Amino acid sequence: MKSIALFGLTGQGIETAGEILSKVIESLGYTHRNWRDFSTIIRGGYTSFEIYIADKYETESPPRLEEIDLAVVWTDEGVDRYLSRLKDKSMIFGPANVKSISIDHQGNPPKLGFNIWSLGIICGHLGIPYQLVMKEVEMRFKKGKNSDLFESGYQLGLTVRSEEPLSDLGVENATISGNDALCLGAIAGDVRYYYGYPITPASEILENLSKWLPPLGGGTFQVEDEIAAIHAALGCSYAGKRTFVATSGPGLALMTEGLGYAAATEIPLVLVDNQRGGPSTGMPTKTEQSDLLHLMNAGHGEFARILLTPTSVLDCIVTIQEALNLSEYYQCPVIIALDLDLALRKISIPWERIESAISSVEIDRGPTFLKSSIEGIYKRFAAVGSSPPIRTVPGVKGGAYVASGDEHDEKGLMEPDFKKVRRTLHIRRLNKANSIQYNRPFSRVGDEGSPITIIGTGAMGELIENFVKNNPGVYQGLLIRQLAPLPKEELTVALKNAKRIVVAEYNAKAQIRTILESVLEDKEVHSLLRFDGEHFTDKEFNEEILAILNEVTSNLTN
């Protein structure tokens, strides 16, 4: 396994060099994972790009790794960040004016050519064929000076060439982010129209679908704000076409009114919240899981909702397809909560694994009536036994109804007998998703008989899996996917053997632990909380978990 870091200024092309590197490594068939850290301002501040390359023929992408094999930095700040993480302290490169770098590892790249020079060093070190990378460089940049910079860096990288250079494995890999995965899953789930407004870290979804939907006969619409986006999506859903909306932070606040309208009119809606640091504008480029309690209760009044949290990039493909099905069956908002790290994280894995996830969920439109006519008097909001109401779309003869946000009767007519409908229609609407038919409320990692359970979701998933894999028998992981309605019976069974539980989450108020409180009442529970916007490395996570448990053991023996 190899790990590389590149550090420079925002606007210096660090991510572009990272993209080229990732694309070349993908073409060689190596599974890998990228990590990006970038400033909230367009010019100024710092950008880091890290890539973790799995061993030959490994199909699981690594988590974020602490130890770095090689780092190329532009400033002293880069040395401060990476020197302590290097396996070999000499394996750091940079310009001549940067401290703590040996003369043999220095160069004189220009500010706006540092990224290409750095790319050369990294590729030379990894033993990636020169022409393979140069082809990608020349596709993006003019020949001449850029080619010379790459050549200079490549020759410098060869002086520390890895003893195990990368070779062509002949494996067909593809690189996707969490946002890419959501788009692929949505398209597989028959989404052909999308309405959005740009906001970090959800903008990639609008960008992707703007390219991917038109060839499929669909389209995207960048509207004036998030209020317009959610209501346009509701209009699309009302018309019988599948869609979803995605946002973050301040955009979520603006969309909250639309959640209530979706609930009142029982129009299917999937909302993706890519959580970032808050409150207010907060930390737009930093990760957090601090919207969860808001998502459980967002909107005035009371109404049913479903809250799902994907646990990996691949899981995003499957979860959004399931969300589309659930929203049409239960006719209520289904919210998917990611965090920034999972949304922007890029992994490169065998294409067959992505293809398998894409085809794993069948489309189920639920009680949606798409035929040409409906018999008898149509009551849009009348339950059919214990099943949800039948939903029609415009054009179905006899199936017209009013979708009003005002309280209404079973036909959709306003100003009904409120005493009657609040005890009947409103109660049905409130309770229709108290229990849902969903067969993936969580994933278990490790042995269910293990005495210590680590609970988490989203970006924490890769860290929990890695920790349990390296500590078998003592620990198990529960990667939570369904937070509302809470699957109490299933979780109670899953936790019956747990003597100690650690809930790991990216917020300050232990929001996941709060949501799970009813199934943790008789357990010894501890929290691992982080809210500085950074994603744990594997070493940091391991040390934090062990510190919590060692402190408990120490307290018990003293």
Image (cartoon, rainbow, N blue to C red):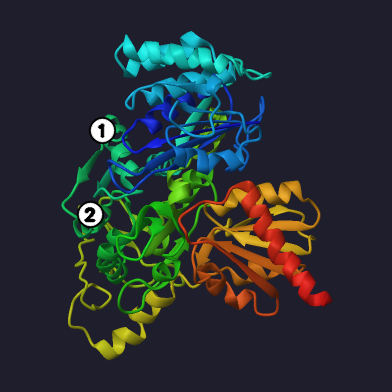
Please give the residue where the numbered disc 2 appears in the rendered image.
Answer: 229
User: Which quadrant is home to the C terminus?
Assistant: bottom right
Q: Is residue 354 above or below residue 541?
A: above
Is any part of residue 360 visible from this angle? no
Residue 481 place in picture, x, y as percent: 54, 58
| Rendered residue at 53%/46% (across/down) | 315
Secondary structure at numbered mark 1: helix
In the displayed structure image, the side of residue 359 where residue 429 appears, left or right: left
Residue in front for this viewpoint, 300 or 164: 164
Amino acid under disc 1: Pro
| Rendered residue at 39%/56% (across/down) | 276
Residue 224 place in picture, x, y as percent: 16, 52
Amino acid under disc 2: Ala
Is any part of residue 194 visible from this angle? yes
Residue in front for this viewpoint, 119 or 87: 87
User: Which quadrant is home to the N terminus?
Assistant: top right
Residue in front for this viewpoint, 494 or 106: 106
Secondary structure at numbered mark 2: helix
Numbered tag placed on residue 214 in the rendering? 1
- Please tell me in which quadrant of the rendered image residue 404 appears: bottom left
